[in-house]
Image (cartoon, rainbow, N blue to C red):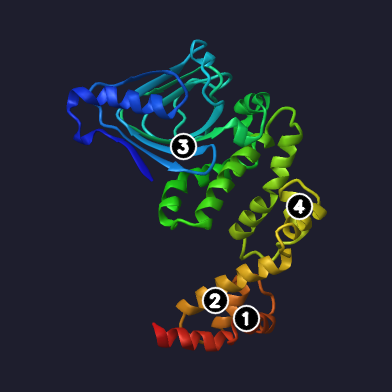
Amino acid sequence: MAVLLDTTSLPWGQRADAVCAALATNLTPASVSAAAGARSRISRWDLGPGADLLHHVSGGHRLTRTGRHLRSDTPERISLGLPRSGSVRLKHRDLPYGDRIGELQLVDLTSPYDFLVDGPAELQAVIVDYAQLGLTVDAVRSAIPRLPGSPLYEMTRRHLHGLPAVIDALPPGPALAMLGSSTTELIRALIASCAVRPDEWAVEAVNGTLFLRLTAFIRQHQREPDLSAARLAAVHAVSVRAVYTAFAQQGEQLAEWVMRGRLEGARKELARLPSGAGAIGRVAHGWGFKDARHFARRFRAAYDVSPREWQQLSALSS
């Protein structure tokens, strides 16, 4: 994380100019105004080529992009914002003008817009170059008013909400790079999923994130016994073959993925529970296993100990 601006240490009279300069530097050209003396903290995370995450604790500001600004030679970009608190109003294309705290706001930054933060607020946005996004301007513009209807809307909203904390918790390395690229891919799929006439890129974007969507659904429903390919296909509006293909492309098998998740969940739960009559059976049943003996066999194969031995070892080490 890089702190681009923190006005706490600045004199009262310099704060507004500092906010305007920081926003003008890190966003597309626009007219910028800020409340006099308002406190502001702007942080930035690099999500990889052509993508950034910005977090702004604002004392109040306004961004207005008009036709005059559109003639600049800056990179064409989109913004997917998430206002978290305060009073935030966006006027852009077909969006209603009003407070939309906690809702995703997709902005085509090649179009005019008016963005008003009226008083103290917290907001964040992922900014992505069109060249990196791989979607046409028309596809993005058609998706703007349809965004809440996307099956990926809630997943993306949760992802953006927790993104700063997750990035800060990860050490530099491959996992951090993968998180950045997967964020861009998720945004790409979100837009493609509700574009009016998805082009070839849009179809590829939706299919390309199918594995991500499937595994996220599995994690949310890990304890439920029916996690079949047929159920996953119905929930995600794809064929059963597409489900199996999505896993095969990652070198995985659906059944084994589900089994590993259930075994790991049961292992963690057993470590917390005292051993007792029926405890292993209850845990097995709670994690989707119909047969406790089958659970015990799979557990030993995965961890080289039986469920009861694991409980005893956990008790000794606690």
Q: Residues within 10 Å of mark 4 (few under 14, many from 20)?
A: some
Q: Give the amino acid type for the residue marked by disc 1 in the picture.
A: Phe
Does residue 118 show up? no
- The label on residue 299 is 1
Tell me the mark number nearer the camera, choosing from 1 and 3: 1
User: What residue is rendered at 64% in x and 52% in y?
Assistant: 212
Q: Quadrant of residue 130?
A: top right
Q: Residues within 10 Å of mark 1 (few under 14, many from 20)?
A: many
Q: Is residue 257 left or right of residue 240?
A: left
Q: Give the amino acid type for the residue marked by disc 3 in the picture.
A: Gly
Q: Secondary structure at mark 3?
A: loop
Residue, disc 3:
102
Camera-side residue of 97 and 225: 97
User: What residue is rendered at 60% in x and 43% in y?
Assistant: 186
Q: Determine whether label 1 and label 2 are within 8 Å by CB.
A: yes
Q: Give the amino acid type for the residue marked by disc 2 in the picture.
A: Arg
Residue, disc 4:
233
- The label on residue 272 is none
User: What residue is rendered at 54% in x and 82% in y?
Assistant: 279
Mark 1 vs mark 3: which is more N-terminal?
A: 3
Mark 2 vs mark 4: which is more N-terminal?
A: 4
Q: Secondary structure at mark 1?
A: helix
Residue, disc 2:
267
Q: Secondary structure at mark 4?
A: helix
Mark 3 vs mark 4: which is more N-terminal?
A: 3
Mark 3 vs mark 2: which is more N-terminal?
A: 3
| Label 1 to label 3: alpha-carbon separation | 41 Å
Q: Is residue 313 left or right of residue 228?
A: left
Does residue 26 show up? yes
